[in-house]
Image: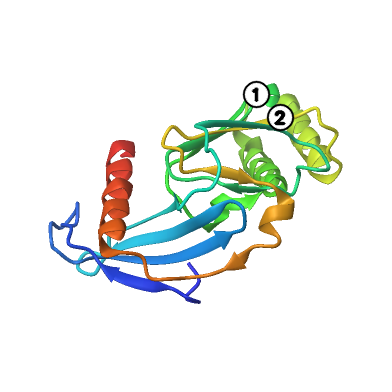
Amino acid sequence: MSESNLITANLNILCPFCKKNTLMMLYKAINIPYIGDILLTTIICNTCKFKVSDIWIIHEKGEYRPNQTIKITKDTINHLVCASAGSKILIPSLGIEMDIKTFDASHITTIEGILREIMDTVRSLLPMTENREKALEIIKTLEEEATTPSGKLSMTLIDPSGHSIIIPYNLWVSRAEKTREIQEETINKIAREILKKWKEKI
């Protein structure tokens, strides 16, 4: 996480690994006009160095659904995808399913970025695949759609917790970053929810 405008908060929560009361949260709030504040967070233990990161939507504007589906076209290819830990990305027509088990910076990217990440993953698995021809066909389709999207692919973002979102290009490019102090009670509530999600995934 970038150190610019980064805020540190001490948490009154025991570390799930070493059981010491030395957990801290590093966070940065990014305000996206007409969407609201997105909180980028990293919880770290100063004793055992346990670390978990996630994103959280706060002060929401509009409705956030657990399932969001979008057709991949030239008008949507640069939409921003913020995928929280525990979410899932599907491209049904290609049989692709990507589980987001933990959050890192790569999970805030454009739809094009998602296609290229999947493409790189399929390429890396080529030596081990039983159906090389099918894998090469998927790579070709992803390359074509990332470069010149035709609208034949759709992407679904699934997040039962409602902490993931697809943000239209014209909104996120004009975003104004702002970081501000968030009440201690809110920070501790978010930290507990992040740790609960993490425990459910291990």
Q: What is the secondary structure assignment of the residue under circle 2?
A: strand
Tell me the tag on residue 154: 2
Coloring scheme used:
rainbow
Task: Residue 15 in the image: state x and y as whole percent.
Answer: 19, 57
Q: Nearer the viewer, residue 85 or 124?
A: 85
Q: Nearer the viewer, residue 98 or 11?
A: 11
Q: CA distance from mark 2 to mark 1?
A: 7 Å
> Are the residues flagged by discs 2 and 1 in contact, CB closer than 8 Å?
yes
Which of the two discs, 2 and 1, sits closer to the camera?
A: 2
Q: Is residue 187 left or right of residue 22?
A: right
Q: What is the secondary structure assignment of the residue under circle 1?
A: helix
State whether residue 102 is above or below residue 158. below
**For the residue marked with disc 2, what is the amino acid?**
Ser
Task: Residue 138 in the image: state x and y as whole percent.
Answer: 74, 31
Displayed quadrant of residue 27? bottom left
Q: Residue at x 38, y 70 (%)?
A: 181
Task: Residue 101 in the image: state x and y as whole percent.
Answer: 43, 42
Q: Is residue 192 left or right of residue 155?
A: left
